[in-house]
Amino acid sequence: MTTYTTTLNLSPPAPSMIATVRPDSDDGTPCDIQLQSATDSGFTTVIATTTLLAQADGVAVSMGMGPFAPGTTIYVRARCGASGTWSAYTSTLTVAIPIGTGDAACYIDENVGVLLVLTGDQVDYIYENIGVLLVLGTEGLTYLYEGDVNADPPLPKIWAIFPGAGRVGDGVTIWGIGFGATQATWLGSIEMFIDGEWTAVSVTAWVLTPASAHAYDDERKIVPSTPHIDPEHNEVEIVIPGLAIPPGHGVRVHLER
């Protein structure tokens, strides 16, 4: 008789989260995965139960959750099995959904690739450039954000992302200000707008880089792609998740109280 075990992890607390579930069977057979969330630890009031069939043994699967109401407490568990035979549930994970106070958004493009249609006529498909509509005015305006020093979470500001395009699993760096000295300072998370909701993604680094000697003189440089950035700034590394599909998704820095 096949024996099944299950491992469950969650991304940082956020209204929309990613659960990573790893199914394991002792004989290597594919496993069904079941992920469950509830408003109480006894799971008498279940919010959602999601089942994925015939997942590869020993391979972690990312599953989107939420959105959940800010200020609530959510309980999450998972199990795996096959043909109605399930493992025991994992230990229940308790997540307090914080109240968001600051967001900064940008956009990550993903490689679309080429659609290849194989027929008896050997037809291929060519994407054509659509072009850009350029409207010239008499004035060029943008907006300058100034810091407001108080006890509240700062208003984060994204300066740039690099590279601006990638594929699932690729790393992306986000440069900006107001993210906090560490990810824990303001319970920060990075979210991508996927399937109509903001979803937390994997963060591999969250750094506050101090100002250089030329941060406030005429030799100051800000070149994120090099990188060479003289003023104090944040650098956050993320990974494009498996839920992301071309052509791209909005990405934001999310801070909590």
Image: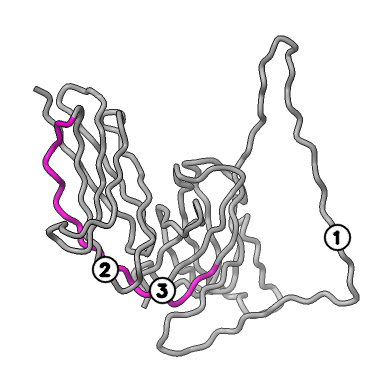
Q: Mark 1 points at which residue?
A: 134
Q: Whole-percent x and y of residue 118?
A: 66, 16
The amino acid sitting under disc 1 is Leu
In three-dimensional space, the C-alpha distance between marks 2 and 1, rounded to whole angstroms, equals 47 Å
Q: Where is residue 134 in the image (x, y as percent from the top left)?
A: 86, 60
Q: Which amino acid does label 3 sit on?
A: Gly
Return the disc, 2 or 1, that comes first in the chain's sequence: 2
238 to 211, vertically: above or below: above
Q: Mark 2 points at which residue?
A: 96
Residue with the mark numbered 3: 100
Span colored in magenta: 84-104
Label 1 environment density (alpha carbons within 10 Å; few <14, some 14–19, many ≥20):
few
Residue at 86%, 77% (x, y): give it.
139
Q: Which element is circle 1 on?
A: loop
Where does the N terminus fall, quadrant-wise? top left
**Which percent across, then down, holds residue 159?**
61, 67
155 with respect to 181 (left or right) = right
Furthest-bottom residue in view? Answer: 150
Closer to the chain start, of discs 1 and 3, is 3
The answer to which image quadrant residue 126 occupies is top right
Indicate whether residue 95 is drawn in magenta. yes
Residue nearest the viewer, comparing 141 with 87:
87
Is 216 on the left-hand or right-hand side of 148? right
The alpha-carbon separation of the residues under discs 1 and 3 comes to 36 Å
Seen from the viewer's position, the closer of residues 237 and 97 is 97
- The image quadrant that residue 42 belongs to is bottom left
Q: Residue 256 carries which label?
A: none
On the rendered image, what quadrant is the C terminus found in?
bottom left
* The quarter of the displayed image where residue 43 is located: bottom left
Q: Is mark 2 on a helix, strand or loop?
A: strand
Q: Work out which residue is located at the far left of the displayed protein and give it.
A: 1
Q: Do the residues labelled 2 and 1 touch (CB within 8 Å)?
A: no
